[in-house]
Structure formats: C-alpha cells, structure tokens
Amino acid sequence: MIISLDMTGEVPIYLQLRNQIIRGMGRGEIGIGEKLPTVRQLAQDAGINTMTVNKAYQMLRREGIITIDRRHGAAACPVVQGEIETLLQDFGVRLELLAAEACLKGICREEFLALCRKTADAVHPEYPEEKTSETENQRKEGGKQK
Amino acid sequence: MIISLDMTGEVPIYLQLRNQIIRGMGRGEIGIGEKLPTVRQLAQDAGINTMTVNKAYQMLRREGIITIDRRHGAAACPVVQGEIETLLQDFGVRLELLAAEACLKGICREEFLALCRKTADAVHPEYPEEKTSETENQRKEGGKQK
DNA sequence: ATTAAGTATTATAATATATAATACAAATAT
DNA sequence: ATATTTGTATTATATATTATAATACTTAAT
C-alpha cells in the first residue's frame, strides 16, 4: 500500500499514517493478518522518524486494530472490543457531524446517502464477523521497565 | 443550544465548539440566519477564554458556515463555496475512514447503512438548496494592522 | 456619551508534534 | 555463540498548537 503524507497540512503525520492504514485495511489492500512494514522500514520509506511511526502503530494497537509482536513486527488484526452500544453511539456522533456538514454544504439527503452506499460498497466485508482465535497477543504487557 | 465541553479530552476546546455548533445547525436547533451568542457571552457561559470562542467562530466563518458582523455578532449563514467535486471527494475520504473503522469494529454493511440513514433523517433539510442573497458580508477584510 | 460587538496585542504556560542519536530487550537467523 | 532484526525507551531539542489573562482598539447601535 502506498502511503502519501502531506507534510505541510494540519493533520499530524502519525494521524495521517494511522488513518491511511485503516482505510487501506478497509479497501482490502491490507489483508487480515497481513504484516505491516517495520517501523524502521516505513520510517525510511516515508522519510520520517521511527518514533512517529511507532506512535501511529501504538494508537492502532490501543484501538484493537493491529497487534504488535516485538519480534515479528506489526500485523493487521482487528478485534472488536468494548460495548457495541458505546461504539455505535460514537460512530453516530461522528456521522452526525459529517451529515450536518454535508447538509450545510448543499449536499442533500439523497446525495449523502448515495455517497454512504458507494463508500460502504467499497469496504471489504472480509473482516471480523467471527474470529476470536489469534487474539492472544494482546495481554502481553506487564509492568516492567528496567 | 446547550454546549458541553470535555476539558480533559484530547479534542481542542475550539474544535469541540465548532463541531457542536455544526451539529446543532444540522439538528435545526440553530435556525438559518439565527444569531449565535456573542463571544463574550459564550466564553462566560462555558467558562473559557473569549479568544477560544473567537477561534471557533473564525473557523466557521472561513468554512462558510456563519457570518460575523462586527457590530451585530455572529449568525448561522451556510454558504456553498468551492467546487462541488472537491467537496464530495473530501467527504468521500472522511466517510471512507468512518466506514473502514466501523467495518474493523465489526459493524457490518447493513448496520452501517442503517446508521447512515438514521443520521441523515435526523438532519434538517431546511438549509442551502438555493439562497445566495445575504452573502455580502464576506469580503470585508482588507490588510491593515496598525 | 455609553455600551456592546468583534478583534488585536502581549505575555505566559502547558501540551503536542517531530526529529536526532543512541541504547536496550528479546527473539530469529546464521 | 554471534550477528541481526524487531519494537521500545531515553534524552535532548525545536517548533507549533492550544489556552489563558489582561488590556486596548474599532465600529456602530443605543
């Protein structure tokens, strides 16, 4: 998957990274279980700092979207976590913002829904649905720093 | 409209303000042409600085969503600006991110589209559609600082 | 003249973002 | 065993963002 960063824009690099990886997974460009580039590799390719990549990966890990294995690197591994209600509520708020903005910009209801359908169709449905087997690598951090 | 701010969250206050005003307009809680609170009033009510409110208002003005009249304050006044294609593309990217995240969180296509419909139905369609009359107060800033 | 509106200014502080250079821990590959 | 590769931690630095405070200015309604 090709990562393209806007270094002059207002969105932080690590967030651009995180968002593009999520969209890449949604498009199926990154298959489930597929390995992501190492932090060093991605940092070098993109011409950015390793810790910036690490920050993006950490965020994705916290969100339950990838797993990170210290010895093998990161891999796409979405896991449903948390209450489904909380989740839907959160998406509802974000969608409402988008819908309101669209409305204010003159995009009518039908146009908006057409865009929603088109977008939904472009998302690969290969993901969670079931699966709860290779979900063991999550609880591997104890408190230990030295 | 009630503004509730999360002072401990990660979203900047001025952005929370901006987002809530947009959602409020979408819901119809703020009618078209309706006046917004003055910066001082809103700042006092919310217990925040006037310049923070001003920053949110400026952002909304730049986005063509409100007008600001130095003597009468701010008012909801959405105006379509820019290429419709650019607009749709921008919304498309943002929707794709949302759809991808939803998918990865186990929300299936139908569930997602149901949420989209529900959200779209909750948005008041009273807005732009036509209207291009009271759009004169936009070009009132020359370059003058001292 | 007073008041009320947005805005500008100046200073300060805390936090976020990004980089650099290096080192460490843990496991694989040779 | 040794070298390599992985993520991670550390320390330092620089810049930008966010938010506040206190004050003053411009403009126009009252």
Image (cartoon, coloured by chain):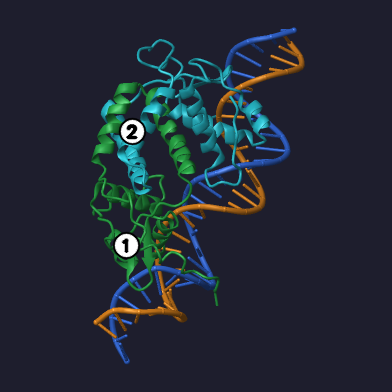
Chain colours: A cyan, B green, C blue, D orange
Query: Left or right: where does residue A81 sit relative to residue C17?
Result: left
Classify the position of the C terminus of chain B by image quarter: bottom right
Q: Kindly identify which chain the residue marked by label 1 belongs to.
A: B
Foreground pick, D25 / B128: B128
- In the picture, measured across the screen, residue A55 lies left or right of residue A45, that is left
Which residue shows up at 38% across the image and 54% down it? B79
**Image quarter in which the N terminus of chain B is found:** bottom left
Verify CB contact (< 8 Å) between mark 1 and mark 2: no
When the figure is inspected, residue A108 is found, relative to residue B135, above or below; the finding is above
Asked whether the residues under marks 1 and 2 belong to the same chain, the reply is no
Residue at label 1?
B75
**Residue at image location 59% in from the left, 37% down from the top:** A5
What amino acid is labelled 2 in the image? Answer: Leu
Q: Is residue A70 left or right of residue B80?
A: right
Identity, as a three-letter code, of the amino acid under mark 1: Ala
Is residue B17 visible in the rendered image? The answer is yes
Near-viewer residue (D20 or B141): B141
Q: Name the residue at 53% across, 16% down.
A: A34
Q: Which mark is on residue A43?
A: none
Query: Which residue carries the number 2 mark?
Result: A113
Q: Position of residue A90 (x, y in %)?
A: 32, 35
Q: Residue at x 45, y 44 (%)?
A: B84
Foreground mark, 1 or 2, reads 2
